[in-house]
Amino acid sequence: MSDIRSNSDIEPCLSVVMPAYNEAATIEKAAAAVLAQRPVQELIIVDDGSQDGTRDILVRMAAAAPRIQLIIQERNQGKGAALRKGFAQASAPYVIVQDADLEYDPAEYHLLLAPLLADRADVVFGSRFKGATAQRVLYYWHSIGNKFLTSLSNMATNLNLTDMETCYKVFRRGLIQKIRLEEDRFGFEPEVTAKVAQLGVRIYEVAISYYGRTYAEGKKINWQDGMHAIWCIFRYNLIRRP
């Protein structure tokens, strides 16, 4: 019997943490898509020093929507730093990371929550590479780099993930709030993967859609972040093991 229920069948149980940096073009639509999902108990948006009007939009949105909790960082500190702030404020039983750029679809929250609600998982990764969902065709070398980083991470953690770098990661709140996170930028992904693996918790993967954007459309990750991810895999799996 399937454990998957629709979003409309799930009671509010999810804190959504959304870092935002210069996302004026998409932030309202992204927040509306999140708040349209019944499992969402709260949306915690961390403005990470935006300079394009994103903050003004968020202040207006937060005043009109009681489920939005707005955290403002005066200077840009990076995705990892924003997530630390958001995780600390989460109050729902489960916590998910949601980017503000519309690359990931909140309508698939029910897929990610299913293993958690069935008490089969403690962490769920959404995989863009497991198939059976819509995927925008974009950069070849990005996909190669992603698979390389995932393989390197898997060798260090002894997990068999297909998409370590995915944005969609869902955690039991008590779990993510007890992990001491250190990375300020995109190193969050290999760091948190290493640390949940070391805890020996139950990790699941589910297929998700991916509507990637180009650099012209605002994509921010670059090759330097990829090089830093390699360092993070070694640092948190081999050098800094608890």
Image (cartoon, rainbow, N blue to C red):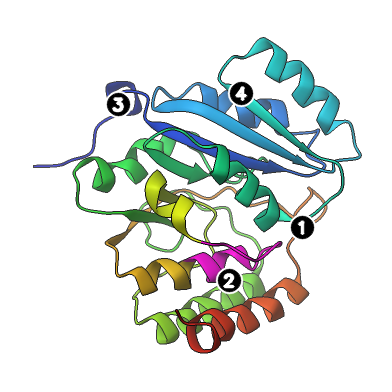
* Residue type at the position of mark 2: Ser
Q: Where are the magenta residues, as a range? A: 180-192
Residue 24, relative to residue 21: is it above or below?
A: above
Real-space Cα separation, disc 3 to disc 2, in angstroms: 33 Å
Under circle 2, the secondary element is helix
In the rendered structure, which disc, 3 or 1, sits on the residue that comes first in sequence? Answer: 3
In three-dimensional space, the C-alpha distance between marks 1 and 4, rounded to whole angstroms, equals 24 Å
Tag shown at residue 220? 1
Q: Residue at x 60, y 46 (%)?
A: 103
Q: Label 4 vs label 2: CA separation?
A: 34 Å
Neighbour class for label 2 at 10 Å: few (<14), some, many (≥20)? Answer: few
> Please, what is the dominant secondary structure of the magenta stretch?
loop
The answer to which of marks 3 and 2 sits earlier in the sequence is 3
- Tell me the tag on residue 68: 4
Q: What amino acid is at disc 4? A: Ile
Label 2 belongs to which residue?
143
Which residue shows up at 77% across the image and 76% down it?
A: 224
Mark number displayed over residue 10: 3
- Percent from the top left, x then y, of residue 196? 40, 66
Query: Disc 4 vs disc 2: which is toward the camera?
Result: 4
- Please determine whether, in this image, residue 57 is positioned above or below residue 204: above
